[in-house]
Structures are given as C-alpha cells and as structure tokens.
Image (tube, helix red, strand yellow):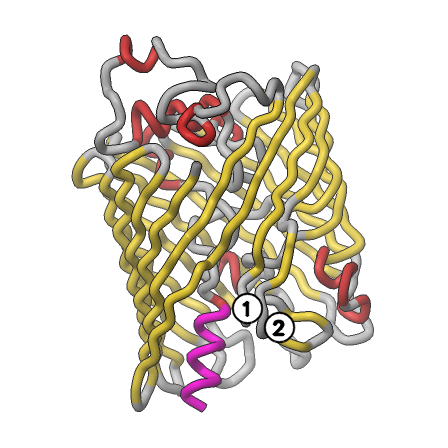
Amino acid sequence: MARTLFFLVATTLVASTGWAEPTFLAKQYTRCTACHYSPTGGGLLTPYGRLLSHRELSTWGPAAAADAAAEDDRHGEQAFLYGALGNALGPVHLGLEMRPSHLRVGFPGGHQDMNLLMNLDLVGAVQKNGWTAYGSAGREPPNAAVRNGRTLSEPAFISYEHWISYQIDDGFRIRAGRFLPAYGVRFADHTTYSRADLDLDRNDQVYGLEVSDTIGPSLVQVMISPGKAESILHDRDHRGLSTAARWQFDLAPRATIVGSAFYRDSTGVDPHSGAVGAAFGIAPTSRVSIWTEVNANLQVKDLGGRSWLVVNETSVEVYRGIWLKFSPQLRTSGGVSGDASVRLGFAADLLPRTHWNVNVGYYYEQAFDAGSTSTLLAQLHLFM
C-alpha cells in the first residue's frame, strides 16, 4: 500500500511542460499572450516574454533600460541557447526545457524519495502574417504515461501541444490542434484542485477547435472537441464530446474577473460531467498578487453529486525574483463519502537568471476520513 500510494502521488506531481504565472498580475500582466504564444498560457515564451524575464523578473538580469535596449531579441542572455544561433533560424523561435527534480512523499507509516527528470522538451513556434504554428516534442516520464489502462515503466515520446492559429488585427482568433482548454486560472501547479480535479492536468489536452475574441478589456474563448487527445489516440472508449467557454474582464491593470464553464458528454465508460467556476484576481501592490477560484464540479462520480472546489493562491515578492506562495485548497465530497479533503501548499520560486530558476514546494493534504500525505518537491527549471 505504501509503494502504491507513493507512485500515485508521484505520478500526479509530474510537471507539465511550461506554465503560466498568474503571480505576474502584480506586474500588470492580465493576459497570457503578453508573454506566451499560447492564448491559454504556458509553454514557449515569445521574444517579448524572454526579454521581460531578462529585464524585469530575474534577480540578477540587467535592470538598466539602456543595456536591455541594446540587445536584439535573438542575441544576449534571453535568447535561445544564449544567442548562439543569432538570426540563423529566421522566423522560427525555439526553446529547450528540462526539470531535474527531487520528490519526497510522506504517508502513514513512512516515506519514500525519488530523483527524476520530470520533462525534457523542445518547443517551437513560427509566426507570420497573423498565422502561428506551434509544437512541442519531448520525453514523457515513466509512471506518468497510461496506455489503455496500463502504466508505462519506460519513458515515452510525447507532443503535449501542437496547433495552428490565425489572428486578425481586431483581436479575433481561431485555433485548431492539440492544446489545454481555456478554463479558470491556469495555476503553475497543475495538481491544484481546480486543475487536476477538473481534468485540466498535465495530460488532459484535447484535439479541438477554439475561437476567441478580444474586445477592449474583455476576452472570450470558446472550444469544442471530440475528446481528450490521449483518449482519441490510445483509448477510444473514453472519448466524449467536450466543450468549454471562458470569459475574462479586466477591471484594472491589476484586477480581473474570470467566468468559466466546461462540459463533457458521456461515453461507454464515463458519465457525463461538467463544471462552472468564477475567479477573481487582484494585486494590491506590485509585489503581491491574490487569486481565488471557486468551482462547482457537477458530476464527479458514477454515483453523481456536486463537488465544490475552492483554491486560493497568495504570492508575495520578498525580493526581486524571489516569490513566496501560500495556497489553501478545499474539495468537498460531492455526495461520495470519504472524498472530501483539505490541502495546504507552500512554495518558494527563485528566478535568479533568465534561463534558470528554482522551485521548492511543500504540500500537506488531509482527507476528512482517511490519512494524510505530505509532499516535498524541489525542481531546477532550465529553459534555454
């Protein structure tokens, strides 16, 4: 039981490729596309996103505007491979990402440790005349890939995202391919209740069509899909029509509200499911951001029942490039005995330089009628 519990927790903590950072609402960035190619955040940074990380977010990146202005987006520390290729790639932008990590899981009666390479991915994007082609290719860790109900014991190849989009000048955009649906707040920790429990985890991308439109302070995103990408590729019994919608309204440069809805049709194996949620983010100062998201998961088990998911993430920049985070989370049972739990997350994100940062997180989870687990996760994130 101890070994089973360990690998269960370890599997859910395997990191996804790239992330968005709602923390940076404190820096007046309310939209993911300010720094990322993906309209739902995460993944490859745009040249502007790299330069921003270099100038404004890292502890020891050059702070002087004159120094940064003298650097081309294809040269200098912020560029791919430290600018070794210069402009040789033309319109192609690449990123290489890896996360060596240490994981320690405590459970009733003991603990276990694991050293692992959480991901190793090459990500690329091309943009021209309103078109964007985007793709990732890399290593899926063992004990994280499930094929037809069987957990793979060896690393496997995977492309988490690959899509193409077209955007016109007035803000209308259409995207097709494999991507994570737009819903709520994309917290960096993909095991957060509002992500993992709503099937927005590491491996829950869909093959779908998404349309979005930006009208002043509003952003509307709507998606339709025949089902999860991995189900379509490897397990058709779990494939079911999915649709999602997300609306964001920016109240101020450091305040925004988000409303979301998600529905998945039933399959021969799974019942239909759905969720509705609302989130509010505010940054009272340039060093503090507070996000709160509440979701009603409308079908969580074959037995039915509504489960409430509440997540808060409060982040404080104690020094340039050093963020401390606290995240209390609540999941109610949804009418299923023993399924309610409370989770407390504590993390420190250190961003000393443009191309690497360190994350240390501690998570304590207590099920209401079962034992508790604790998890310590230390990661070195290298992004070239």
Disc 2 crowd, CA 10 A, few/some/many (<14, 14-19, 20+): some
Find numbered disc 1 in the image and state the secondary structure of the residue it sits on: loop
Magenta span has 2? yes
Q: Secondary structure at mark 2?
A: loop
- Determine whether, in the image, residue 122 is placed left or right of residue 24: right
Residue 31 appears in the picture as rendered: yes
Distance between mark 2 and mark 1 Cα atoms:
6 Å
Q: Position of residue 151 (x, y in %)?
A: 62, 75
Q: Residue 271 sits in which quadrant?
A: bottom right
The x, y position of residue 127, in whole percent, is 64, 22
Q: Is residue 132 magenta?
A: no
Range covered by the magenta-colored residues: 1-11
Residue type highlighted by circle 2? Leu
Q: Residue 218's x, y, as percent? A: 56, 28
Residue picked out by circle 2: 152
Q: Residue at x 46, y 61 (%)?
A: 191
Determine whether, in the image, residue 169 is placed left or right of residue 26.
right
* Image coordinates for residue 311, horizontal then vertical, percent: 41, 57
Write down the quadrant of residue 255 in the picture.
top left
Q: Which residue is mark 1?
A: 142
The answer to whether 38 is drawn above or below residue 195 in the figure is: above
**Residue at x 49% of width, y 67% of height:** 12
